[in-house]
Image (spheres, rainbow, N blue to C red):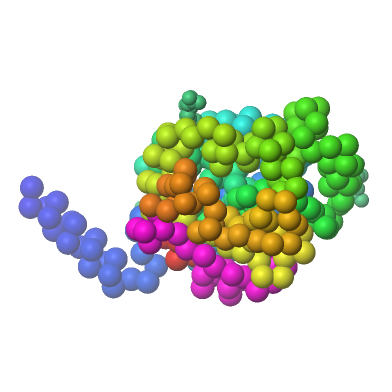
Amino acid sequence: MEWKIIFLAAVSVFCTASVSCQSNSSMPLVIWHGMGDSCCNPLSMGSIKNLVEKQVPGIYVNSLEIGSDIVADMANGFFMDGFAQIKMACDIIAKDPKLKNGYNAIGFSQGGQFLRAVAQMCPNPPMHNLISAGGQHQGVYGFPRCPGDNSTLCNLAREMLNLGAYDSFVQDNLVQAQYWHDPINEAEYKQYSKFIAIINQENYVNQTYKKNLVTLNKFVMVMFGEDTMVEPKESEWFGFYVAGTTSKLYTLRESQLYIQDKLGLKQMDAANKLVFLTAPWDHLRFSDEWFIANLIPYMK
Ligand SMILES: *[C@@H]1O[C@H](CO)[C@@H](O)[C@H](O)[C@H]1NC(C)=O
Ligand SMILES: *[C@@H]1O[C@H](CO)[C@@H](O)[C@H](O)[C@H]1NC(C)=O
Ligand SMILES: *[C@@H]1O[C@H](CO)[C@@H](O)[C@H](O)[C@H]1NC(C)=O
């Protein structure tokens, strides 16, 4: 079988000698868009996909579409139960043959906490690096502004929140209520939040969530330094308001979540798996240069 050896040698010489030779060995990437956005908007996720494809030649990118089309995808970002969305995402990922050997993932805004839930709940195929760009890991206690060009759905969401975030109708029908975290009413939050309190193991510790999360290679959390859309922005690094206050903040390392290591974040920290980045702009407003320098390295 000498011809095989010669062939392989020839290929490797060709590949090292030629700039155009692509090994296509990069890991695929899964993207989850934020609130008010969809999988394939050419101005948002579409341009991110193009940027990644240009920076990592040959990479396969699956930008998750939660629903049958982009209109449903955008509406589902407001009105589809969080765990139903996670299940849909896990099914898409499991059924995509190009992801079967594992993938990196980047979530934008609420897509960040959703992909963390995917990592906790759906270990097959395995997620390698998780990048959360402005994800609200401790939930939110305010949406001062609406993202995107069309505020209709966002304003409707806000009106529903005004009815009472922990009202059972609102919890059943509004995603943002499911990650609403009221520090003045922590007990209510823990009892009634149908998404974030559960994935953060507030009442019950599911060891499977922890076992799965710690298998990540890196968990990269981007906080936007000038964020005017998420309150508090420190939630993007797992910080939040001290119970009973709306001004005093604790950090991840000061949280019970970390101290009791309910999610394995302390263990991951000790293994240097947590990466905290600050992007010095408003919500999701990073530059291409910043994205390339800071995030592309986790997508290779
Ligand atoms: C590598 O990826 C490029 C772009 O997706 C594709 O055109 C090419 O056929 C792939 N090469 C191999 C060897 O798989
Ligand atoms: C723990 O989480 C796993 C993964 O989502 C799930 O299959 C299992 O049913 C959960 N266990 C309990 C007791 O809720
Ligand atoms: C905003 O979105 C709503 C709901 O999808 C739609 O009815 C409305 O026409 C949109 N407005 C604009 C200005 O695009």
State the image coordinates of residue 62 (x, y, percent, origin top left): 55, 46
* In this rendering, position of residue 88 left or right of residue 264: right
* Camera sees residue 89: no
Instruction: Name the foreground residue: 107 vs 269.
Output: 269
* Camera sees residue 171: yes
Residue found at x 47% / y 33%: 206
Instruction: Name the foreground residue: 282 vs 288.
Output: 282
* Residue 288: quarter of image: bottom right
The C terminus: image quadrant: bottom left
Residue found at x 52% / y 48%: 257
Instruction: Name the foreground residue: 296 vs 224.
Output: 224
* In this rendering, position of residue 164 left or right of residue 222: right
State the image coordinates of residue 290 (x, y, percent, origin top left): 58, 73
**Residue 272 lies within the magenta run:** yes
State the image coordinates of residue 56 (x, y, percent, origin top left): 47, 62
Residue found at x 67% / y 70%: 225
State the image coordinates of residue 33 (x, y, percent, origin top left): 65, 49
Q: In the orientation shown, which residue stands out farthest toward the left?
A: 2
Q: In the orientation shown, which residue stands out farthest toward the front?
A: 244
**Residue 284 lies within the magenta run:** yes
Specify the segment rendered in magenta: 268-295
Q: In this view, does 159 lie above or below 95?
A: below
* In this rendering, position of residue 182 left or right of residue 239: right
